Image (cartoon, rainbow, N blue to C red):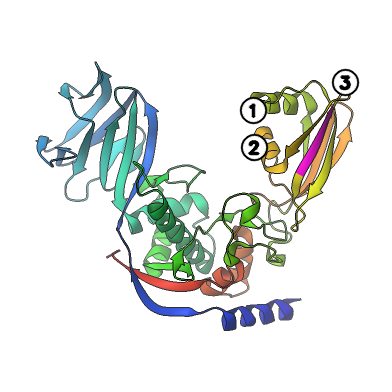
Amino acid sequence: MIKKLLGLLVLSFVILLIADDVVTAKAKLIRVAILRDQDHFTVAVDGRYEILDFITGKVLQAGPRLRPVVVTLENGRTKVGTHVYDLARIIIAPRHETAVSVNDGYFRGNIVVINNSGAGFTVVNSIELELYIRGVLYHEISDKWPMEAIKAQAVATRTFALYSMEKFAARDYDVTNDIYSQVYGGKGSERYRTNVAVRRTRGEVLMYKGKIFPTFFHANSGGVTEDASELWDVDILPLKGGVISTFSVNSPHYQWRRNFRLKDIQDGLNARGYKLGLIKDIQVIERNKSGRVRKLKIVTRDDKAETIEGKLFRDAVGPNLLRSNLYEVEMKGWYVDFVGRGWGHGVGMCQWGAYNMAMLHHDYKQILSYYYPSSDFVRIKGVD
């Protein structure tokens, strides 16, 4: 089996074009929404700082240190401690690479405070791309893992970030700091080995036909990756799925069993807009080519039936409870067992597969070419 997989890897490298071209990034600053819809938050700078008008750059306030103050709304205006600004946006800019404290987090770069017409604040960390990646990796992969796996994650994270910068350029922020983009913790999340991985892959991204694409990743594929088009409006060769990820076998989360009370599933679905009575049966009625559940039929105890998409069902039940859509259903009276494989959506790189490939001495480019076939490695400018 290992020889067969090595053969596939060699073949993938024949197909894969390792690009020597250098592509210039449109921007090197990424905008990370670290707070949204907040009516107040605490900010501090343990060093020299300035507060600027976002539009004109005029210095509104400056000092050797900004002691912890609460940013609140006062008659729809932005109040920072005792100072009130009738501006839609202000920038809190530290000097000499001092970090800004926002609530319990510490962030490099500038903090942009957006007053949403007096309805609340969006707080955005504007930071250099490479520093952003340093604040992500610890949350997405263990800093104790093999270096080649961490480097693979660094390239995937950088590529996804640049894709988001292009896609959401007209929005107030490019990414959020949670699972809906990439989990980001700022300076407090940096670790030595993850920082090394960022430095050793500096500027490296993946492209397909000359374009950045969303390099999705997940914890464990359960043995086979998913087609991105099953979940999102993305249909390109590197994300077509069907990669037989035997490297993920026998890793954590490869197999699992979870018991649910049917009433809890009913409540979860009804909270999403369904109107279901007591559930009697849950049946898988359609699977996609990876074996994941595409559609389910929910039968209630008054013999009414509802067809639900597998991805919507998992979201309603809880994606960290129902770990993937690769499962079988075992009804048990007022309860149900889901017996499945993998954790996550299954698209793109399997992180535990990357771990095991690295343990078998595959380097990060081999890992990435295996999980994103037909993609090209490109080094971008604009990150120095």
Distance between mark 3 and mark 1 Cα atoms: 21 Å
From the viewer's perspective, is residue 43 above or below residue 29?
A: above
Sooner in the amino-acid sequence: mark 2 or mark 3: 3
Residue at figure coordinates x 74%, y 29% from the top left: 265
Are the two marked residues, 2 and 3, in contact with CB atoms closer than 8 angstroms?
Answer: no
**Local SS, label 2:** helix
Residue at figure coordinates x 26%, y 24% from the top left: 70
Distance between mark 2 and mark 1 Cα atoms: 9 Å
Check disc 3 and give the amino acid type.
Asp
Residue at figure coordinates x 68%, y 27% from the top left: 268
Are the two marked residues, 2 and 1, in contact with CB atoms closer than 8 angstroms?
Answer: yes
Instruction: State the residue position of label 3.
Output: 302
Which mark is nearer the camera, 2 or 3? Answer: 3
Check disc 1 and give the amino acid type.
Arg
Instruction: State the residue position of label 1.
Output: 272
Q: Is residue 329 magenta?
A: no
The percent coordinates of residue 357 (x first, y second) are 62, 69
Sooner in the amino-acid sequence: mark 2 or mark 1: 1
